[in-house]
Image (cartoon, helix red, strand yellow):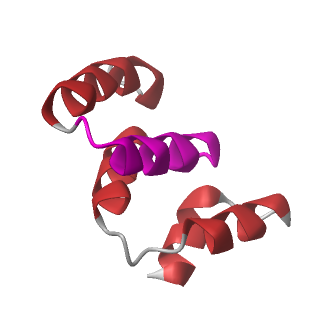
Amino acid sequence: MVTAATTAPSIRARVERSAPDAVFEWRFDELERAGVDAIEAVRLAIDVTFDIGRLRDLVARGCDAALAVTILR
């Protein structure tokens, strides 16, 4: 069974090998910390127009991370 917990390490390994850019890595880490699933975190880390600060604010106020992503898109 594949879950976010089992896919995150393999996605992280691919991301770190293919995108050494420090800004991308920071964005990816922040998105994961906020509760965004690893695959979506990769997509959003690439999109520099996506506002991670607003995402963190919504999550801190009790909004589910997936719903916060939908709201902010």
| Residue 21 pos. (x, y %) | 28, 43
Q: Residue furthest left?
A: 18
Whether residue 46 is in magenta: the answer is no
Residue 6 x, y percent position in the rendering: 39, 18
Q: Where residue 49 sits: x, y (%)?
A: 39, 78
For the stretch drawn in magenta, the main secondary structure is helix
Outermost residue on the right side: it is 61
**In which quarter of the view is residue 52 placed?**
bottom right
Q: Which residues are magenta?
A: 20-36
Q: Is residue 50 left or right of residue 2?
A: right
Q: Tell me what residue is drawn at x 52 percent, y 50 percent.
A: 31
In the visual, does 31 lie left or right of 3? right
Residue 36 visible somewhere in the drawing: no
Q: Nearer the viewer, residue 47 or 8?
A: 47
State whether residue 64 is above or below residue 13: below
Answer yes or no: is residue 70 visible: yes
Image position, residue 37 (x, y; %): 45, 44
In which quadrant of the rendered image does the C terminus lie?
A: bottom left
Judging depth in this view, the residue of 11 and 62 nearest the camera is 11
Q: Would you place residue 23 above or below residue 15 in this image?
A: below
Q: Nearer the viewer, residue 62 or 46?
A: 46
What residue is rendered at 74% in x and 70% in y?
Answer: 58
Picture layout, residue 60 above or below residue 23: below
The residue at the point 53 percent across, 74 percent down is 51
Q: Residue at x 46, y 51 (%)?
A: 27
Which quadrant of the view contains residue 38? Answer: top left
